[in-house]
Image (cartoon, rainbow, N blue to C red):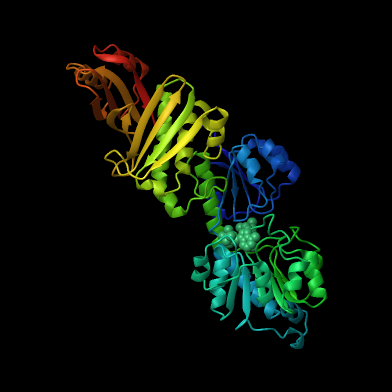
Amino acid sequence: MERKRVLVSERIAEEGLEMLRTELDVDFRDDISREELLSVIDQYDALIVRSVTKVNEELIKRGTRLKVIGRAGNGIDNIDVDVCTRYGIIVANTPDSNTVSAAEQTISLLLSSVRNTAWANDVLKGGIWDRKPFRGTELYGKTVGIIGLGRIGSMVATRLKAFNMNIIAYDPYIADERFERFGAEKKNSLEELLAEADVVTVHTPKTKETIHMIDEKAIALTKKGVILVNCARGGIFKETAVIEGLENGKIANVALDVYEKEPAIDNPIFKYTNVVCTPHLGADTFEAQKRVGENIAEQVLLALKGEIVPNVVNLPAVLPEELNYLRPYITLAEKMGNIYYQIEKLPIKRVEITYSGPITVNETEMLTIGFLKGILEPVLWEKINYVNARLLAAERGIKVYERKEKQSAKPFKNMLTINIFSQHHEMEISGTLSRARNPILVDINGYETEANLEGYVLMLQNEDRPGVIGPLTTTLGEAGINIASMKVARQTKGQTAIMILNVDNNVEEEVLKQLEQIDGLIGTPKLLKF
Ligand SMILES: NC(=O)c1ccc[n+]([C@@H]2O[C@H](COP(=O)([O-])OP(=O)(O)OC[C@H]3O[C@@H](n4cnc5c(N)ncnc54)[C@H](O)[C@@H]3O)[C@@H](O)[C@H]2O)c1
Ligand SMILES: O=C(O)CC[C@@H](O)C(=O)O
């Protein structure tokens, strides 16, 4: 089979490239021009970028084979996620892989800033031994105002506590407990924080709300001699306003890792000796880049195999521990979805999914998405994935209803019952996990059963009377097909029963025809493949 192709348009760690090469054809092209990128993108199944490559509609439209965009890093402001979602393209990032490095870079820039380290270094290496211009300030006892107490903001808080700084923070989107946990005094408004802080450091994403959050008005509210740090995203600081604050002496020092326009060359802010600048190095440590490279490679490989990808940004956010717990249930839902079109050929009008048992306290959206992906897979094959499953189901007119029941009615702790309706027909299937957490079908159309949704499953209907099972097992045995497990179920004695067998090998068409001839078997046997 032809190997899938990935284009890596910015440098990622060699370890990540190696992982990709095990399964894919990899083109590492950090020198690629925009024009070339646009002209070759239709040859790739995946694109891996960092913060420079702009993944916009123009690119996505041309990337007709694209299934996944891997963002080797955290911020996704260079990616139009909504457009990717519309085109069914998975966007995955590596949010936790570089947080420590970004937090350490913030501390490093702040220390360099208050002690004029970078400036003194330049002057000394220029041949001048002078100490006068470089007198700095201590952090000890000062107040740091952290805007955005997320992953990086909270790590900065913990580290600056060790310097005996007083920590205040503004983040309207998190619970009060988080402020307490990180020893930060909560500020209810940005204005309050700006008025009290000696150092202001931003750690928010770049959003409509945070663009130019630190502008002339904000700077006017700060203390005279304030120190400003931006190791988050260019554009959160309005650079013209910061320059004005430097010129009029309101701002004592500025530390920047990120800029309104990147790459930043000839930025007018570079001329100020009390501004310390690095070229977006927050994530640039050996450790972070190894983690980021490996993590993005792993996710791209999973995405191209249609498997669950942990950090998809265009899917409901699920915590890693919760995802680990839910993962086998997502697989169960997907396999239950796979059943329908292997048995029926009638278009689906509506599905009703009932989640029952303790699982209902979890975010079940991913299970619903998994089911829809599973149901449409036989029809849409490679086109469908977790990101576009809901959209494609809606486009095909499938209405989806979900229900949660705290208590599972059947003898299983957690259960999924799915009713699939076509114009004049209904199929009901129930599934759960085995002790080994493998997916099993426990009920089909009111017949209690037990079949592993794995490998080959043979489904047959039969008259509930002696003399049917024997010829069936003989026929399979003569065809060299081993039966791994078999369950016969009936609703009323002497009427119709069903048999569900897990078999170790494929059952060829010819053998299925022989089975159909057995006296007492009803209709055509179905072989389901999982
Ligand atoms: N310099 C680098 O190389 C580098 C490396 C990694 C991350 N980053 C950037 O650092 C920033 C923080 O990353 P993170 O992983 O901590 O993100 P995060 O999502 O964990 O935390 C961001 C926090 O900002 C808060 N927030 C959002 N809007 C806000 C607003 N208007 N006012 C106040 N708070 C607001 C959120 O509630 C959240 O708690 C991002 O912009 C990311 O792209 C930069
Ligand atoms: O190294 C990069 O590409 C940017 C890193 C950082 O800004 C991020 O958002 O992860």
Snapshot quadrant of residue 41: top right
Expressed as whole percent of the image width and height from the top left, the position of residue 350 reads 48, 28
Judge whether 279 appears above or below 184 on screen: above
* In this picture, residue 274 sits left or right of residue 295: right
Task: Evaluate whether residue 247 shows in this view.
Answer: yes
Residue at position x 62%, y 75% in the image: 144
- Residue 197 in sight from this viewpoint: no
> Quarter of the image containing the C terminus?
top left
Residue at horizontal 61 percent and vertical 41 percent from the top? 85
Q: Position of residue 516 (x, y in %)?
A: 30, 14
Q: Quadrant of residue 470?
A: top left
Q: Looking at the picture, does residue 86 appear above or below residue 444?
A: below
* Of the pair 400 and 252, the residue shown nearer to us: 400
Number of disc labels: 0
Residue 488 location, x and y as percent? 24, 26
Name the residue located 42 percent from the left edge and 41 percent from the top edge. Answer: 330
Task: Reply above or below: 350 against 33.
Answer: above
